[in-house]
Image (cartoon, rainbow, N blue to C red):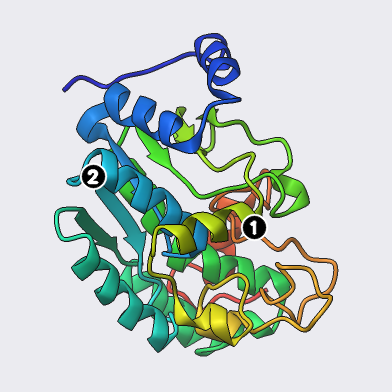
Amino acid sequence: MPQITFDDLELGEIAIELDDQEPQDVIRWGLETFGDRVAIVTSFQIDGMAVLDMAYRIRPNVRVITVDTGRLPQETYAFIEEVRERYPEARFETFFPDAAEVERYVNAFGFNGFYKSVELRLLCCHIRKVQPLLRALADVDAWFTGLRRDQWASRAAIRKVELDHDHNAIVKINPLADWTEEEVWEYVRANNVPYNPLYDQGYTSIGCAPCTRPIQPGEDNRAGRWWWETNAPKECGIHCPIETGGFEHEVHAILGANGNGHH
């Protein structure tokens, strides 16, 4: 199947058409438009599970891509097995970080170097999440996310379909963009969609085990991510390019040619 491409103007018109459509209609558009060249990319949080369940009802053999950072909570690994059993016809693809880069990072900064500075935390996210995702997205023309406008300030303007200029201008499809967290949970409960048991322990955003904690009453939903940082972006770089400009250069400078460079 040849690569399907859109320009900003074409996709902008489609985004306007889809803006008041139900998530299932947006997902159906994505599946029909891109066929095997579209995948759900998910860490199996509640939003991604809603998208997966909706897509599975439309096309059971949908592609599902996830990144295993190597530092996920044990509950998440057990839950992923449950998801694979629940949706047996879906095609699950797992991507891992480059082992040599992880080795260089750990040898230079220790297993938990990400606690030492925001820069080292972003570098860890870059190695363990962003880079594997780049490899995964090299093989698709479009990807489904579970992003919602109400999740975080940097996500307030997302459209249901948009060109992803951070990833070779493939199409990024956000079927739940205008849903609230309550609507996601209503869908999950009404359709008996499995969800990560960590939600029942007070987690609201589930990432790597060392970087995620339950939130306290009254705290923002993203407060459980990288909670030791102050005034730092609550993003990992997958959906929001945090370090503009020289971050790629910075990565090489921090790691150094042999991984021992420190600045």
Q: Quadrant of residue 195?
A: bottom left
Q: Residue furthest front?
A: 190
Residue at numbered disc 1: 182
Residue 130 visible in the displayed image: no
Q: In terms of secondary structure, where does tag 2 sit?
A: loop
Is 41 situated left or right of 252 in this image? left
Q: In terms of secondary structure, where does tag 1 sit?
A: helix
Q: Is residue 97 above or below residue 6?
A: below
Query: Foreground: 31 or 181?
Result: 181
Residue at numbered disc 2: 62
Circles 2 and 1 in contact, beta carbons < 8 Å: no
Residue type of the residue flagged with mark 1: Glu
Q: Quadrant of the C terminus?
A: bottom right
Q: Position of residue 25 (x, y in %)?
A: 42, 29
Q: Residue at x 37, y 18 (%)?
A: 5
Residue type of the residue flagged with mark 2: Val
Query: Foreground: 38 or 134?
Result: 38
* Mark in the foreground, 2 or 1: 1
Query: Foreground: 65 or 253?
Result: 65
Q: Quadrant of residue 28?
A: top left
Q: Position of residue 88 (x, y in %)?
A: 15, 60
Q: Residue at x 17, y 46 (%)?
A: 61
Q: Quadrant of the N terminus?
A: top left
Q: Is residue 135 above or below residue 74?
A: above
Is 245 situated left or right of 172 in this image? right
